[in-house]
Image (spheres, rainbow, N blue to C red):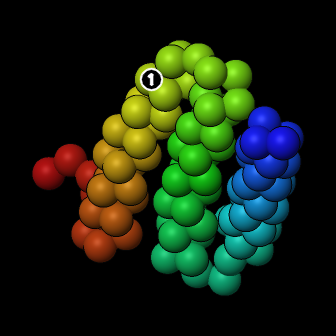
Amino acid sequence: MVTTLLEWSINFVFGCILLAMACCALRLVMGPSAQDRALALDTLWMCAMQLALVLGMRFASDLYFEAAMLIALLGFVSTIAIAKFLLRGEVIE
């Protein structure tokens, strides 16, 4: 019973994250401004990190957790670079 509930909840969360990623991809393509696209990209990498964590729980593998950490680090740096570019027009001064 517990295993079935856990599998069902992981599958539900997996579907919700995929739906959120689809909505972010739609905003990334159709966003009216660069700020909307930057926010959609930021949310998209967060969803990718959560997806890696859910897959790590589903398959009980540490590799997915390490991939989630790499996605988080690269996503944070890319968000800072995009924000700096949108604010000043250049990334490296």
Q: Write the residue at 42% across / 30% down.
A: 70
Q: Give the percent coordinates (x, y) of residue 3.
A: 78, 36
Q: Give the percent coordinates (x, y) of residue 52.
A: 61, 35
Q: Write the residue at 73% across / 63% down.
A: 20
- Lateral position of residue 90 relative to residue 4, left or right: left
Q: Quick check: can you spot residue 15? A: yes
Q: Write the residue at 64% across / 40% down.
A: 54
| Residue extending furthest toward the front | 1
Q: Quick check: can you spot residue 74? A: no
Q: Which residue is mark 1?
A: 66
- Lateral position of residue 40 relative to residue 77, left or right: right
Identify which amino acid the numbered label 1 is placed on. Answer: Glu
Q: Residues within 10 Å of mark 1 (few under 14, many from 20)?
A: some
| Residue extending furthest toward the bottom | 32
Q: Give the percent coordinates (x, y) of residue 40.
A: 59, 66
Rendered image quadrant of residue 27: bottom right
Q: Nearer the viewer, residue 10 or 86?
A: 10
Identify whether 69 is placed above or below 92: above
Q: Give the percent coordinates (x, y) of residue 6.
A: 74, 43
